[in-house]
Image (cartoon, helix red, strand yellow):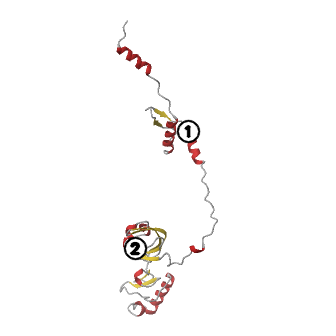
Amino acid sequence: MSITVAEVQTDQAETTAVDPAPPTLVDQVAAIEVVTQIPDIASIENQSDHGESVAIDPTLIESSIEAAADEVVPPMPELKWPLPHNCLSEMGQSNMSWTVVAHPGTVPEQYHLNPVVFKNIAEQFSMFDKVQLLAPDASWWADFLVVEMGRDAASLHLLQSVYLDTGEDRQDVIPGFQIRRAQPGDGQPGWILVNRETGNTLNMNLPILSYQEAVHFLTHSSQVHGQHRSSGLVG
């Protein structure tokens, strides 16, 4: 009996066929990493190196999550040595403090790590200078620290910001007269009393530092001058 070449090849193909290889440890670990990124999934299928679909054991996922939760963060070491005597410098000798008037209608958060807005004045700053930013309408002020210097650029880190009552939204104590917080262009601190009709300032060169004092001042002026708003302090 003769055997052809085709029959020999067929027999070899049948004998070389093997069952799919079981999932390796690498397959299991890779699948666990995928599942731990997706919450509330008990099982998932991951493609192995052999091309087969591998079912993941949920107990492996739970044990992996528990092991990660048990990791202990080492405590920060205690600082036990004092600063040297030569570390102290008077403000102005090493770092400067600056006051800058912000753009109208902006808020402190817009200036945080934004080198574009300080481009024109960046050359004046040095690392770790302090910059106080003031809103033109006195609605807020903020402290910044220069943390990065570049060519024609400086990045400032927002340390704190405080929003103030400008008085703009308050109802007039006496109709026709406004009590508002002083703005950088007013040339004096505190509160400003304004005759809305004429735009004149009632307390020019007379700083009033509290809103209650401003109300008392305005009420007293109104009682003295009555309805004659164009005379005396009323302007």
Q: Residue flagged by tag 2: what amino acid is it?
A: Glu
Q: Secondary structure at mark 1?
A: helix
* Label placed on residue 123: 2
| Quadrant into which the N terminus falls | top left
User: Residue 94 location in percent, x, y?
Assistant: 50, 76
User: Residue 179 location in percent, x, y?
Assistant: 44, 82
Q: Secondary structure at mark 2?
A: helix
Q: Nearer the viewer, mark 2 or mark 1?
A: 2
Look at the picture and state if 165 lies above or below 22. below
Is residue 23 or residue 198 the one in the foreground? Answer: 23
Look at the picture and state if 157 lies above or below 185. above
What residue does disc 1 label?
Answer: 60
| Quadrant into which the C terminus falls | bottom left
Residue at coordinates 38% horizontally, 91% vertically from top-left?
Answer: 230
Question: Does residue 170 appear in this view?
Answer: no
Question: Does residue 224 appear in this view?
Answer: yes
Residue at coordinates 56% horizontally, 42% vertically from top-left?
Answer: 64
Dot 2 surroundings within 10 Å: few (below 14), some, or many (20 or more)? some
Q: Residue flagged by tag 1: what amino acid is it?
A: Leu
Is residue 67 or residue 210 the one in the foreground? Answer: 67
Look at the picture and state if 95 lies above or below 67. below
Earlier sequence position, callout 2 versus callout 1? 1
* Label placed on residue 163: none
